[in-house]
Amino acid sequence: MNAPATQSSVPSAPRGPRPVRIAITTGEPAGVGPELTAAVLAGSAAHWPDAEFVVLGDRDLLAARAAAVSVDWSAITAHARVSVEHMPLAAPALAGNLNAANGRYVLALLDRAIDGAMAQEFDAIVTAPLQKSTINDAGVPFTGHTEYLAERTHTPRVVMMLAGTGARPLRVALATTHLPLKDVSAALTIDGLVETLRIIDHDLRRHFGVPQPRILVTGLNPHAGENGYLGREEIDTISPALKAAEAEGIDARGPYPADTLFQARYLSEADCVLAMFHDQGLPVLKYATFGEGINVTLGLPIIRTSVDHGTALDLAGTGRADAGSLIAAVDTAVSMARYRHAVAASSD
């Protein structure tokens, strides 16, 4: 369960007068979220001495799952900067066995974190993976974390961005998220792409300290449409959006063929790639960074990070799950919260 410390992609900021307070939702109770949370917090005092953590979940589940992977949960909760807000399961949870009775429990964890962050009780939230099917089977239409966060915070448009860690991380944002492939073209509009580019530009400056973000944009079709022979979305939608964004001072370039864009000669000076759909950009990102990558929701009024993987039901309770991605997500959330505090303090 151990994982190496990661290097945040957010510039270091001076530590403020109070610790940053991070809420962690433990996600699907049958998955790896509870045990990974325990593994991460076992090293929290050393990794993040200026952070406080509020774990949202069923305390008995957390203790049992920690014990199953040889983590001393009582030692974690004895630490002054780690607390558990007990939210009881609706039904017993067994590792690897989904139970729709707990679908609304998972949503309750997320609702509590969002409400606390909106009320500035939490400086950021970190979400362990959940199982969409369990929530849908519980009778709640649910597409994903990203869409739910947008709805609950009344944010008209958010952007899903996955990123690696390190001094110059690979970042990939998405113009569309969880849509069937047949619906992607119709979902792409000039105004929508311009607003997406605004959000990326704004949040890279605001949360990641990138002074002048450079965004590379993929086409939708093979070979970026081959001058219209393989599709007109690049001509009719993507290129006009790039011109409009450029007129606003946003450094967005493209559209580039997605199959050749992800090379060092293009990415070496880029701060983010905007891909048109989920499986266009994320396979490359996950191949390069899986196990250490993170998911960040841009455009929200709150800070939210998450892991780059799912519930891993086959690994739950075995001790074989790698905590690296959750460590990176927590590290980035702490760094983003510190950076936001530093910016706010400098403007006072």
Image (spheres, rainbow, N blue to C red):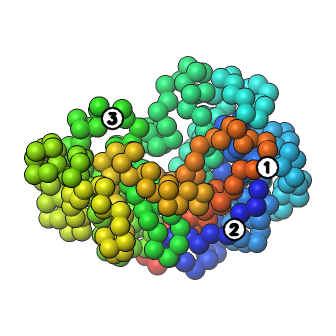
Q: Considering only order in the chain, which callout, 3 or 1, is on the residue closer to the N terminus?
A: 3
Identity, as a three-letter code, of the amino acid under mark 2: Pro
Q: Which one is earlier in the sequence, the residue at label 3 or at label 2?
A: 2
Residue 329 picture location, percent across and down: 59, 59
12 and 36: which is toward the camera: 36
Mark 2: secondary structure? loop
Q: Which residue is drawn at 70% across and 38% down?
A: 314
Left or right: 289, with 2 as reference point: left
286 versus 59 height, above or below: below
Mark 2 / mark 1, whichever is N-terminal: 2
Measuring 53% from the left and 49% from the top, which residue is drawn there? 118
Residue 273: give x, y in percent of width and height.
Answer: 34, 60
Q: According to the image, label 2 marks what residue? A: 4
Q: What residue type is labelled 3?
A: Leu
Q: Of 310 and 345, which appears nearest the observer?
A: 310
Q: Image quadrant of residue 129?
A: top right
How crowded pointer 2 is (Cα within 10 Å; few <14, some 14-19, many 20+) is rated as few
In-image side of 206 versus 142 (left or right): left
Is label 3 in a helix, a strand or a loop? helix
What residue appears at the point 21 percent right and 61 percent down from the top-left corner?
254
Marks 3 and 2 sit apart, C-alpha to C-alpha, by: 37 Å
Mark 3 burial class by Cα count in 10 Å: few <14, some 14-19, many 20+: few
Q: What element carries label 1?
A: loop
Residue drawn at 63 percent across, 41 percent down: 311
Residue receiving disc 3: 181
Q: Which three-letter amino acid code belongs to the residue tagged 1? A: Gly
Which numbered marker is on residue 319? Answer: 1
**Marks 2 and 1, Cα distance to the nearest angstrom?**
16 Å
Tags 1 and 3 touching, CB below 8 Å: no
- Disc 1 crowd, CA 10 A, few/some/many (<14, 14-19, 20+): many
Image quarter in which the N terminus is found: bottom right
Left/right of residue 93 with respect to residue 261 in the rendered view: right
